[in-house]
Amino acid sequence: MSAPDAVAAAPAPGLALERWQLMGLLGALSMFAPLSTDMYLPALPSMAHNLSASASAVQLTLTASLIGLGAGQLLVGPVSDARGRRRPVLIGLLAYTVSSAACAVAGDVWTLSALRLVQGAAGAAGIVVARAIVRDLFAGIEAARFFSRLVIVFGLAPILAPLIGGQLLHVTDWRGIFVVLAGIGAVLGLVCWRALAETLPAQRRQRGGLPATLRVLRVLVRDPRFSGLTIVYGLFFGALFAYIAGSPFVVENIFGLSPQLFGVVFSVNAAALVVTSQVGARLLARTGSRRLAAMGLRVGLASGIGLLVAVLAHAGLWSVLPCFFVLLASYGVVSPNLTALAMAEHPDAAGSASALMGLAQFGTGAAVAPLVGLAGTHSAVPTAVVIASLVAVSYAIWATMATREPAPAAGRPGRPHD
């Protein structure tokens, strides 16, 4: 099913949005993960000093946020399948605004970590609902193309967030960054209350309460194709998050760049993610989601191996930075295509499927975030080892799946073709 140029709303509050407006709004809802993590990345070293905490303890604030993002999706996804998309996202945005403001006044790293858990769980509503709305309205190659186009919008967050965070540090400290996040949540909440319409009709909603929800989740988990793609997606995102958590200390503490220059480097890498996602979208009709995903996974594997070799050989900053750049570029191809492939065959459980993907994604990120700081702030080896290991395992699982699954026929309904 394709959405028309003007996306008509089901009978519910909200406006009928043009396709580009819908893309902008869903992209904004998808930005909570990069906004909540990337904007305060330049402040991590100064935050550690201000809170008298170690690098690993400060990185636990990233872990807490990711646990919240994953667990929150597991809650909101099934709820959105049963109650519709609009109400959960509005409640989530309100909670995000309040918890972000509370983070700004946290007195120690442990209180901040607890509040970041709540902030992440609240922000999860926007992420899971945005993916589910795309699956409500699109299928097959069109869904993969729309996911790729969304990268233009939510890809701006990792480009702009560290730059904004670095500049904010000229006039405020890390607490001011959380005040800005609270303001973003409030503005987006008002926009969604005014403009976001319901996309899941009542007749398509899941019924039966918790037992029905558990049955849907059980079906998804037992689907080897969905589970395999979800694990591949989660592991590759884990490598990306190891870069997010480790790069501030690698680039600033080890190689001596300022927070502002780190923001520039981070933004250039994020721009590569956006560009490759759009190149992939243009190639979809000819190449197919599976082949594009395979290409991205291979390139990501090469970047991880290259990074590990560069770090162990003490090759310097200008050998490390290209590896980071290529890793981000490969993710721009991998992410939208794995998302479309995994969700293709579960249109009536899009919220739950999106939630499980989010749980794998952010659960892996939460697990790896403290690992990159195990050697303190003066070694890049843990970051390189974690990234190389995750991309290698991710590609190995993909390759195993590819040998077991025949290529789908071109144009087969509900599944992007090769």
Image: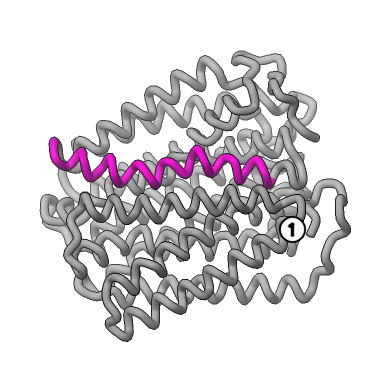
Tell me where residue 13 appears, x and y as whole percent: 61, 13
Tell me where residue 171 appears, x and y as whole percent: 13, 36
The magenta stretch spans residue 153: yes
152 w.r.t. 388: above or below: above
Magenta-highlighted residues: 144-171
The residue at the point 17 percent across, 48 percent down is 108
User: From where the camera sits, is residue 222 visible?
Assistant: no
Residue type at tag 1: Thr
Q: Is residue 188 left or right of residue 336?
A: left
The residue at the point 58 percent across, 32 percent down is 23
Which residue in the structure is indicated by mark 1? 287
SS majority, magenta? helix
354 w.r.t. 334: above or below: above
The residue at the point 39 percent across, 33 percent down is 96
Asked whether 411 or 398 is in front, the reply is 411
User: From where the camera sits, is residue 105 visible?
Assistant: yes
Residue at disc 1, secondary structure = helix
Q: Is residue 7 left or right of residue 128?
A: right
Tell me where residue 43 appears, x and y as whole percent: 21, 50
Q: Is residue 63 left or right of residue 410?
A: left
